[in-house]
Image: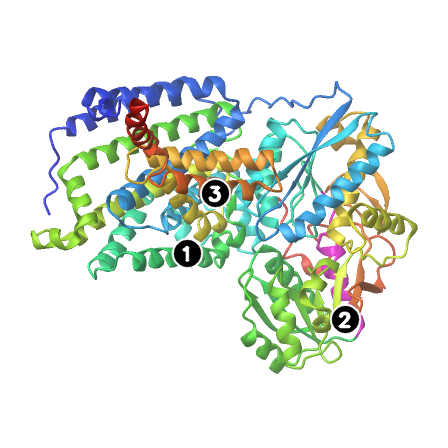
Amino acid sequence: MFKFFGTRAGTWTGFAAAALVLFGLAPLVMTGFRLGLLAQFLCYAIVAVGIGLAWGRGGMLTLGQGVFFGMGAYLMAMHLKMADAEFRNGPGAVPDFMELAGIRELPAYWTPFSSAGFTIAAILILPTAFAVLLGLAVFKRRVKGAYFAILSQALAGAFAILLIGQQSLGGFNGLSRFRYFFGYNLDDPVNQQMLYFIVAGVLLVVVAVSLQLRRSRYGELLVAVRDAEERVRFLGYDAANVKVVAYAVAALFASIAGAVFVPIVGIISPASIGIVPSIMFILGVAIGGRASLVGPVVGALAVAWAQTALSEQFPSAWTYAQGLLFILVIALLPGGIASIASVAKRFQTKRTPVEAAA
Amino acid sequence: MPLRLKPKARDLARTFAATAAIAGLVATAACGSRAGEETAATESCVDTSGDTIKVGSLNSLSGTMAISETTVRDAIALAVKEINAAGGVQGKEVEIVAEDGASEPTVFAEKAEKLIREDCVAAVFGGWTSASRKAMLPVFEDNDSLLYYPVQYEGLEASENIFYTGATTNQQIIPALDYLAETGVKSIYLVGSDYVFPRTANAIINAYAEAHGIEVLGEDYVTLGSTEFSTIINQVKSADADAVFNTLNGDSNVAFFREYANVGLTAEDMPVMSVSIAEEEVGGIGVENIEGQLAAWNYYQTVDSPANTTFVEAFKAEYGADRVTSDPMEAAYNSVYLWAATVEKAGSFAVEDVQANADGVSFDSPEGTVVIDGDNHHVTKTARIGEISADGLLYTVWESDGPIEPDPFLEGYDWAADLAVTE
């Protein structure tokens, strides 16, 4: 069965099935609220696809994807707040939360965000450029393994603290109360469903890009760097550049996810982008299976869904249940949920001879 | 480095095209209202036909705020139990749907929406931090539902869909300043956590100080949860103010007061006025470090009233004799009774009926009679300055002449004209 999904026809079937579930089945069987939740989870899945590429294929344990997720989210949130203020009070108006913080004049760096085009360009370019610069600085110095993980995690912590201190970005409370998304009312259920479709579409595109990268020569090079960086270097490749590309793509995916997360959830604050959320991103990928294509998606959805379902069921004890689940998955399926088929197969081949003998 | 794609790049292009086509198709078929247009009103799904009526209790049961918010959950449950024992609301038994806000604003927003849209609750009780309230506010407004928020906060807000049963600034911070001024304080030092409540509180304090001839000798903020205070305490000590105004929240208070006592500062030479330290927190800080210091609230466990005696006894009977009652717990307890009384008055659970009938609804609460102001959805509250005593409880040393009318935008204070922002 899994061989089939390796073929071209299999890939198409897989995508068609995913599209059918996301665009056809889910809106039919889910209530508006559940669909909104699924849209939120799909954002996490988009981040996870990037981590799958950087960590699963490239061996870079990025414990700080919250930084890029946060950048995309805050950039989008700034545009939504600007659009909201301008819609109600005309051009140059100060967003409502700033008035509360005692800021009477619009800070200069906010002004360009009244343009939708500038905002979208910023969401695509800024985090990617930051990742390229950071990646060059880190990977050229051959920082890797645990040192890179610690560095990226420290970055996420520092970024959250930096934002808490910025009153002109909402400080600890973050930015919330968005009313319009590019001119559409966000409280309209029809528009909320449209947002879900946008996220689902983005996820499919992101998975397609990831698949293409994996199948390209670059993808093979990336795996080679992961498994034997020195040898790749002796062959004449610059391993740092290979890593930077995967790291930047992961950053871009996280930024896009953050940008669509904001209108769906309605709030972005430092609490959603610091160390803990960054670890939750990684956790989803680990649970799902970091090296496979769909593993990160499945893992991110499973972790988020389990968290919601368990906390609804056992509001005061769900953290124990969640911890137990993590331990069980890691202990029984070290390769993640995606490895369930191969584990089952191994189990079968082990048992068959015994049964035959009996 | 060569980055050549295999011929399969065509696949990518096709996938892109297909996805874009699907997305485009769906999007054009599903465009809703645009900015400025009216959105079709969301139908409330509250079921009033049965013998029970559901309400939500949304508090952080995990994460850093759990230690404070679980006490609020207990107070809400106690009020519901008492109301049910007395015959329920409109003859219906009140059923609590509990959810965990997990100390995260996004989770608060998610769970609030779940309570409204999936559980169809008539009202939600809970929330603690301003961040959690700000996250929930659009959810309650968009779905036209009701939130009862029980914690003192920074004011400057009045939503049709929220009832604020904790103090706004003119019922807590301004009376605290009045008290300090009365006792002859001429200079103060401000210490707070870095988020919206301390910053707004200090903006108000600065305006008050300027108008009343009090000198502000310093204003320092630490990250929420920070426990590093040696520098700040040294600055406080060398500034030698008449008093310190403390708007720190959570664990930071433990480190602050330990360090304060360590350098030899006492309540006699430089009293600290705190606005976030209640009975629950005193135990964590250690009475020996904080004895004699001041706090500003509307309720203490030691308030002498028949209603409070009943409340404290009922609470201890339900949850154990070692438990204490605090201001946010009492405000949460009140909020359930105020909701029930408003529903009885309106004869309906519908949001618009509750909103229309809220004005003037009162409850003989443990802190004294509280009355809902129908315009700003806050309640009248008596301000009390308490002194922390050796038994870990707070005793009232000063109280306002009767309940103070809520004034969230500080419209009744000339010196606050520059602060008040009307939405």
Which residue is disc 3 drawn over? Answer: A81
Q: Which chain carries label 1?
A: A
What distance separates the C-alpha of mark 3 from that of mark 2?
40 Å
Category of crowding for the residue at label 2, using alpha-carbon neighbours closer than 10 angstroms: few (below 14), some (14–19), many (at least 20): some
Is A59 in front, or is A182? A59
- Residue A353 vertical placement versus A147 (above, below): above
Looking at the rendered structure, the kind of residue marked 1 is Phe
What distance separates the C-alpha of mark 1 from that of mark 2?
41 Å
Nearer the camera: disc 1 or disc 3: 1
Q: Mark 3 lies on which chain?
A: A
Residue drawn where x is 30% and y is 28% of the image: A345
Residue B59 pos. (x, y %):
64, 43
- Whether residue A118 is visible, yes or no, is no
- Residue A220 vertical placement versus B65 (above, below): above
Category of crowding for the residue at label 1, using alpha-carbon neighbours closer than 10 angstroms: few (below 14), some (14–19), many (at least 20): many
Q: What element carries label 3?
A: helix
- B283 with respect to A273 (left or right): right
Category of crowding for the residue at label 3, using alpha-carbon neighbours closer than 10 angstroms: few (below 14), some (14–19), many (at least 20): many
Residue drawn where x is 62% and y is 42% of the image: A316
**Range shown magenta:** B164-183
Residue B325 pos. (x, y %):
78, 53
- Residue B27 vertical placement versus B163 (above, below): above
Which residue is disc 2 drawn over? Answer: B181
The residue most toward the right is B306
- Residue B268 vertical placement versus A303 (above, below): below
Q: Is residue B162 magenta?
A: no
Task: Say yes or no: labels 1 and 3 on the same chain.
Answer: yes
Q: Is mark 2 on a helix, strand or loop?
A: helix
Which residue is disc 1 drawn over? Answer: A159
Residue B65 pos. (x, y %):
61, 52
Give the quadrant of residue B57. Answer: top right
Nearer the camera: disc 1 or disc 2: 1
